[in-house]
Image (cartoon, helix red, strand yellow):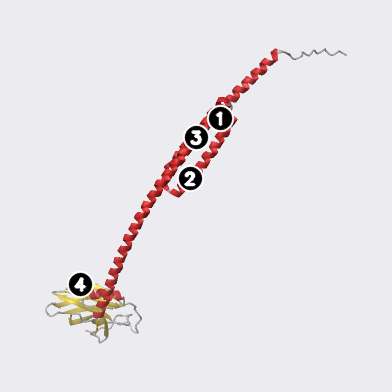
Amino acid sequence: MTEPNNVHYIPPPSGPGLKIPILFGIVIALVAANVYLFLQLDQVRTELASMRESILGEVSNLRESSTVTSQTHQRRMETMRDELDAARRQAAMAAGQAKEQATKRAEELARKLEAEQARQREEQAKAQQQLSHELSEVAKATETTQTGLGEVKTEITNTKSELSKTIENLKQVTGDLGVQSGLIATNSTELTALKALGDRNYFEFDIRKTKQPIKVGDIALKLKRADAKRGRYTIDVVADDRTVEKKDRTVNEPLQFYVSGARQPYELVINEVQKDRITGYLATPKVRETRPTATAKASG
């Protein structure tokens, strides 16, 4: 068997030669720490710049709504306070010149925050003043509107009073079929009063002498003769495919005739007779009911 080789261990060096690498390592560690602190301060500077842009953006939207704006600024200020506390904590952890710069930056941020708060209070005061002015204008407009409504109500009351007087003056006469007529209007004012009552449907017409009948409501009329001097006229009434002549009738005389599906008679009233022209209205029942027979009944 072979004998193992003898191994000789060299003892570590001692003395001044070992201290130099250790000191060099400490210097490198301090430089790395300073670089880290510088990077941290640069990050703080970037965050503060970004924070300033965010504040300006929030302030630009201040006038949109006083309540929403106040809440937004409150949240922004809380965020800035948090960032300020973080910057102060970082400044407290820094050393030497880096600590002094971080402290100055934090103090500058605090001053800006105070200035921003003051500007926000000023903007809110202006917004409140503008809101008060607008509320005052709304109050004035409301007062003006109420005055106008009062005048309209007075006018409506007067109109109702005039309609009531007009209705009182209307007359009931017997029609040409011997049926008691409804209220008869002799002019446009009285016809307006009748329409206001709403008892019947009313169709105004102004027709001239023509070859073909002219449709009025669900019937048709044909003027055959008009004597303006005597106030008399002759017309054909076309209803239910039947034609009935109303001959030599007078102004404001109710002409009555039945149509299928109506228990009450239709009424024609001519208010004015001119040369080859008549004006008046047709009154029809509001409700059409089924009659025993479907044949229209009219009298000349």
The residue wearing badge 4 is 206
How many residues crowd mark 1 within 10 Å: few (<14), some (14–19), many (20+)?
some
Q: Nearer the viewer, mark 2 or mark 4?
A: 2
Image vertical order of residue 56 relative to residue 100, above or below: below
Q: Residues within 10 Å of mark 4 (few under 14, many from 20)?
A: few
Circle 2: element type:
helix
The outermost residue toward the right is: 1
* Residue drawn at the location 54% of the way across and 31% of the way down: 103
Image quadrant containing the N terminus = top right
Query: Residue 56 appears at what percent x and percent y?
Result: 44, 39
Identify which amino acid the numbered label 3 is placed on: Leu
Check residue 72 in the rendering and tell me which mark sits there, or answer none: 2
Work out which quarter of the rendered image holds the C terminus and state it: bottom left
Tag 2: residue type? Thr
Residue 210, by quadrant, is bottom left
Q: Mark 3 to mark 4: distance in Å? A: 87 Å
Nearest-to-viewer mark from 3 and 4: 3
Which comes sooner in the sequence, label 3 or label 4? Answer: 3
| Label 4 residue SS | strand
Nearer to the camera, 211 or 132: 132
Which marked residue is nearer to the observer: mark 1 or mark 4?
1
Q: Is 278 positioned to the left or the right of 37 in the image?
A: left
Circle 3: is it few (<14), some (14-19), or many (20+) Cα within 10 Å?
Answer: many
Residue located 19% across and 77% down the image = 271
- Marks 3 and 1 sit apart, C-alpha to C-alpha, by 16 Å
Label located before the other in sequence (1 or 4)? 1
Q: Disc 1 designates what residue?
A: 40
> As displayed, is residue 147 above or below residue 60?
below
Q: CA distance from mark 2 to mark 3?
A: 19 Å
Query: In whole angstroms, how far apart are the C-alphas of marks 2 and 1?
Result: 29 Å
